[in-house]
Image: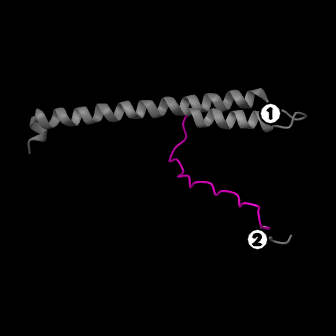
Amino acid sequence: MSRVDGLPAGIPAAPTAPARTPKGTLDQSDFLSLLTAQLKNQDPTKPVDNLQYVQQMAMFSQIAGTTETNSKLDGIADRLDQLLTRFPTPATEQ
């Protein structure tokens, strides 16, 4: 294929897209967007098995639950650290 270096006079160049910064993590909204795109673009003669969709959604729910649990455990650990510094026990007073 040949490359076109310039445009004829009177034809404006396409605007450049603004730079996007990538996300560090994906959330439920991103998952649903991907799932919707997958459904829109699948081959109608070879649809994806429903079991695969259910497995993907269950996996996402499990990951979301684990993330929430980890967040809560971090909060509990921080609170325990604060309590230990306020009320030291004989084992921590060395």
| Residue 18 sits in quarter | bottom right
Give the Cα distance between marks 1 and 2.
44 Å
Return the disc, 1 or 2, that comes first in the chain's sequence.
2
> In the structure shown, which secondary structural element does the residue marked by tag 1 occupy?
loop
Residue 33: image quadrant is: top right
Q: Position of residue 10 (x, y in %)?
A: 76, 63
Q: Is residue 1 above or below residue 83?
A: below
Quarter of the rendering occupied by the N terminus: bottom right
Tell whether label 2 touches label 1 (CB within 8 Å).
Answer: no
Looking at numbered disc 2 in the image, what kind of residue is underneath it? Answer: Gly
Dot 1 corresponds to which residue? Answer: 48
**Which type of secondary structure does the marked residue at label 2 adopt?**
loop
Residue at 55 percent of width and 41 percent of height: 26
Circle 2 residue? 6
Looking at the image, residue 70 sits to the left or right of residue 79; the answer is right
Q: Is residue 92 left or right of residue 2?
A: left
Give residue 68's position: percent from left, percent from top. Answer: 44, 30
Residue 62: x %, y % from top left:
55, 30
Q: Looking at the picture, which amino acid does disc 1 mark?
A: Val
Comparing 81 with 38, the one in front is 38
Neighbour tally class for label 1: few under 14, some 14-19, many 20 plus, Cα within 10 Å: few
Q: Magenta stretch: give its range.
A: 8-27
